Image (cartoon, helix red, strand yellow):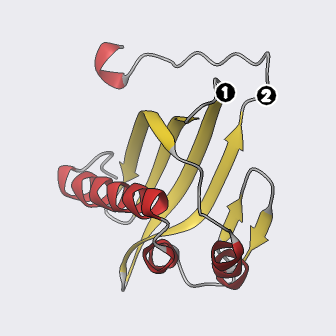
Amino acid sequence: MIVNDPAALAEVTAAVEAYETALMDNDVEALDGAFWNSPHTVRMGVTENLWGFDQIAAFRVGRAGGSPPRTRLRTEITTFGADFAIANVAFQRDGSDKIGRQSQTWIRTGDGWKVASAHVSILQAGADQRLAPTTESR
């Protein structure tokens, strides 16, 4: 198995960037398109647990205003072979001093790269909010 094959890494990086743009633009159609349309897809959010694509899509439609604006602090993407990847993002919501975390499991499908599992959380006050050095500086 090849870890971080350049072609797979470029594809997933583009998918993660497109997802971030859709998230900040509240482009519900693009956000839904980024997720695997399956009852096996899971998204654990800051205030919700969503099981299956239908619950995830319903959440997006019902979310007034979309995701709060944020600044990404670090993005780490690792591919495993040509069809599986993990993306982790540390972010800070605008106007907050708390660090948020997002992890996504991406799989290659017949329709391209899709999120099969996602988790979003915000570190609580008093938690260690330091960011580890980037891979390049390790």
Residue 41 relative to residue 3: left or right: right
Please name the residue shown 30% across and 49% down the image. Answer: 2
- Which of the two residues, 35 or 24, is positioned nearer the viewer here? 24
| Label 1: few (<14), some (14–19) or many (≥20) C-alpha neighbours in 10 Å | some
User: Looking at the rendered structure, which numbered label has been put on residue 98?
Assistant: 1
Q: Secondary structure at mark 2?
A: loop
Classed neighbour count for the residue bearing mark 2: other residues with Cα under 10 Å, few (<14), some (14–19), many (≥20) = few
- 50 vs 116, nearest the viewer: 50
User: In the shown orientation, is residue 65 left or right of residue 42?
Assistant: left
Q: Residue at x 32, y 14 (%)?
A: 137
Relative to 99, is 81 above or below?
below
Instruction: Please state which of residues 9 and 16 is positioned toward the viewer in this rendering.
Output: 16
Residue 44: horizontal and vertical position, in percent?
73, 58
**Snapshot quadrant of residue 63:** bottom right
Badge 1 element: loop
Residue 109, placed above or below residue 107: below
Amino acid carrying label 2: it is: Gln
Residue 81 falls in image quadrant = bottom left
Label disc, if present, on residue 124 of the rendered structure = 2
Q: Please tell me which residue lies in front, 99 or 132.
A: 99
Q: Position of residue 61 (x, y in %)?
A: 64, 79
Image coords of residue 129 (percent x, y): 64, 19
Instruction: Determine which quarter of the picture holds residue 38.
Output: bottom right
Residues under numbered marks 2 and 1 in contact, where contact means CB atoms less than 8 Å apart: yes
The residue at the point 73 percent across, 79 percent down is 55
Instruction: Check disc 1 and give the amino acid type.
Output: Lys
Distance of label 2 from label 1 (alpha carbons): 7 Å
User: Is residue 98 shown above or below 120?
Assistant: above
Relative image position of residue 20 (x, y in whole percent): 42, 55
Q: Quadrant of the C terminus?
A: top left
Residue displayed at 67% across by 75% down? 56
